[in-house]
Amino acid sequence: MSGLIMSPTTGVVVTGGGSGIGRACARALAEAERPVSLWDLNDEEAAKAAASIAADCGVVTHSVSVDVTDGDAVAHAVTAAREALGSIGGLVHAAGIVTAVDIDHLTEEIWDSVLGVNLRAQVFTVKALLEDLRRHEKSAIVGIGSIMSVVGNAMIPSYTSSKHGVVGLTKSLANHLGADGIRVNAVCPGYIHTPMMAAVMDDPPSRAALEAKTPLGRVGTPEDIAKAVRFLMSDQADYITGTTLIVDGGVTSHD
Ligand code: NDP
């Protein structure tokens, strides 16, 4: 696998690494021989995932319980990950939440919590990792956006805004960090079968409706997204920065 992927050998922090897309990204990066640190609120699942990845891929893995919206917790996690992995040259921000309420029912608390995890946490996690990312060659960052980075949904104004924000943040960081050789990109998943989407995916009519909207005729897997993330983190993407890669089976290709 590593021969094909040609990755740097530095460690990668994966937020949300205990579940769904984050966990698949951590495994895909480990398959390319990168040490990985799985950060998650759900420390039990993150520890289980890290142990399973270590057993299967033979790389150093680490997990830590962290609320990525808490600056002190992030600072502690950076120190722990640096010690465990030996180096940190990458970040995948996959921690995310969604709360389905339209503008009539939106509260300041919901807005702040969704923006806090999906967008603000990426900003301040990058900031906490800057020294490490700058210290190593070929560092890269991937933020997980969504098809809601490019279209809107009436039921999730806070989520839609946070995911549009990820695209803007990607471009701004790419501009600033290019001089340091740090690439910054976003991957925007379509409908992916993860715990976040379990209620919809496990309801046959709802799932069929999603499949009908998807030109490739199926919902996505976390591995579909992880492959794209691994590509953007690898040397094969070494002239790609500031971009948004939509991985949605074609959902946003039609009205
Ligand atoms: P999951 O719910 O499976 O995984 C998200 C993980 O992030 C969970 O383990 C969750 O922990 C963790 N998390 C939530 N808040 C925090 C926090 N404050 N600090 C640390 N960890 C936190 O979701 P997905 O894998 O589906 O989502 C991953 C990303 O992909 C998200 O950004 C999501 O918006 C995005 N995405 C997902 C799509 C999909 O169809 N699934 C489509 C488009 C984008 P806990 O479970 O304890 O809350």
Image: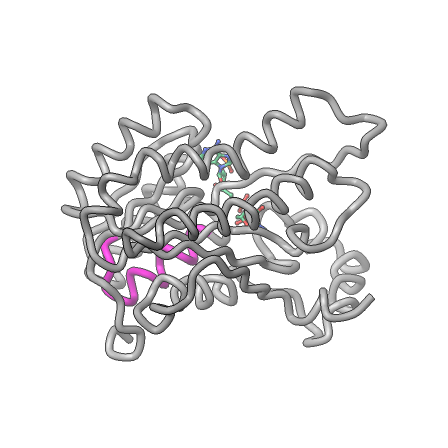
Left/right placement of residue 124 relative to residue 163 reads left
153 to 3, vertically: above or below: above
Q: Position of residue 251 (x, y in %)?
A: 71, 66
Who is closer to the viewer here, 88 or 169?
Answer: 169
51 to 207, vertically: above or below: above
If the image is split into quadrants, where does the N terminus sit? Answer: bottom left
Who is closer to the viewer here, 54 or 39?
Answer: 39
Q: Position of residue 246 (x, y in %)?
A: 59, 64
If the image is split into quadrants, where does the C terminus sit? Answer: bottom right
67 to 220, vertically: above or below: above
At x 29%, y 56%, the residue is 181
At x 59%, y 27%, the residue is 113
Q: Position of residue 67 (x, y in %)?
A: 42, 28
At x 14%, y 46%, the residue is 86
Left/right placement of residue 203 relative to residue 227 reads right
Query: Is 28 inside the magenta-drawn segment?
Result: yes
At x 67%, y 26%, the residue is 110
Region of the chain picked out in magenta, as a range: 22-35
